[in-house]
Image (tube, rainbow, N blue to C red):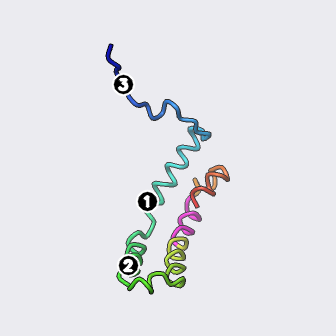
C-alpha cells in the first residue's frame, strides 16, 4: 500500500492568540506601514553604506544613523495610525 501525503494545511495548527478584530487592526496597520515608510531613503542609506570600504561600514556612527532613519520614519506612522493604539501591548511591542 502506497503512502499518500496529505496537503499541508498552514492554518490547521494555527494557535494565534489574536482575535479576528485584532488581525484586522494588524492588517490595517501593516498596510499603512507599507504605504508610508520611506523605503527609498532607507534603501539609499543602505546603498551608501555598502559602497563604503569595510572599515568605514562598521563605524558605529554610520549604523546609528541608519537605525535612527528607520525608527524616525516609524514614529509618524504610529502617531497617525489609530489602529496601532487598539492593538494589544504585546502586538505593539512586536511591531516596534
Which of pointers 2 and 3 indicates the residue nearer the eye? 3
For mark 2, give the secondary structure: helix
Q: Quadrant of the N terminus?
A: top left
The earlier-in-sequence mark between 2 and 3 is 3
Numbered label attached to residue 5: 3
The earlier-in-sequence mark between 1 and 3 is 3
For mark 3, give the secondary structure: loop
User: What residue is shown with label 2?
Assistant: 50
- State the separation of the CA atoms marked 1 and 3: 37 Å
User: What residue is shown with label 1?
Assistant: 34
Give neighbour class at mark 2: few <14, some 14-19, many 20+ (Cα, 10 Å).
Answer: few
- Image point (66%, 49%), residue name: 88
| Snapshot quadrant of residue 71 | bottom right
Relative image position of residue 68 (x, y in whole percent): 54, 76
Numbered label attached to residue 88: none
- Image point (54%, 73%), residue name: 72
Along the horizontal axis of the image, is 6 left or right of 93?
Answer: left
79 and 41: which is toward the camera: 41
Which of pointers 1 and 3 indicates the residue nearer the eye? 3
| Snapshot quadrant of residue 38 | bottom left
Amino acid at each position: 500500500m502506497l503512502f499518500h501525503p496529505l496537503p499541508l494545511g498552514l492554518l490547521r495548527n494555527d494557535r494565534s492568540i489574536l482575535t479576528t478584530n485584532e488581525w484586522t487592526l494588524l492588517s490595517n496597520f501593516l498596510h499603512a506601514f507599507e504605504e508610508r515608510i520611506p523605503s527609498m531613503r532607507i534603501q539609499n542609506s543602505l546603498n551608501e553604506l555598502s559602497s563604503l570600504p569595510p572599515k568605514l561600514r562598521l563605524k558605529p556612527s554610520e549604523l546609528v544613523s541608519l537605525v535612527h532613519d528607520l525608527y524616525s520614519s516609524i514614529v509618524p506612522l504610529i502617531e497617525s495610525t489609530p489602529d496601532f493604539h487598539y492593538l494589544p501591548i504585546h502586538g505593539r511591542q512586536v511591531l516596534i
